[in-house]
Image: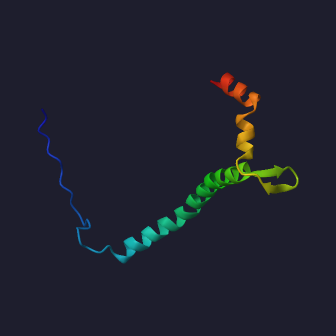
Amino acid sequence: MSSKSIPQATGAAIQRGQVPSAQNRSESVFKHALLAPAVIWVIALTFFPIIMAVVYSFANYVLGEGITGFVGFDNYARLLTDWSFWYAILITV
């Protein structure tokens, strides 16, 4: 077994109960401000298409006209009774 000792931290570390300085807070705010647009962009590009796919799956969507009516689970019922869907699942599996 090794008997190496772990070096102790030295310097001006923030101890428990101490309030960080104004400079540290402003640096933290600046970092978050720079990061926020990228995070918002990633969230928008991830969740917006998923939400719209769910909305379109419950609607009658006509290309060029948009959503023409709400059909509920009719699209899913038609999908589950279509033999070509089950054939595609069989081929995929």
Camera-side residue of 24 and 74: 74
Q: Quadrant of the C terminus?
A: top right
Camera-side residue of 54 and 23: 54
Q: Quadrant of the N terminus?
A: top left
Q: Is residue 83 above or below residue 73?
A: above
| Left or right position of 42 against 65 | left
Q: Residue furthest bottom?
A: 22
* Image spot of residue 89 (x, y percent): 67, 27
* Image spot of residue 65 (x, y percent): 87, 55
| Left or right position of 11 against 4 | right
Q: Is residue 43 above or below residue 6?
A: below
| Image-quadrant location for residue 4 | top left
Q: Which residue is found at the position 18% from the left and 54% from the top? A: 8
* Image spot of residue 28 (x, y percent): 43, 68
Q: Which residue is found at the position 17% from the left and 47% from the top? A: 6
Q: Which residue is found at the position 38% from the left and 71% from the top? A: 24
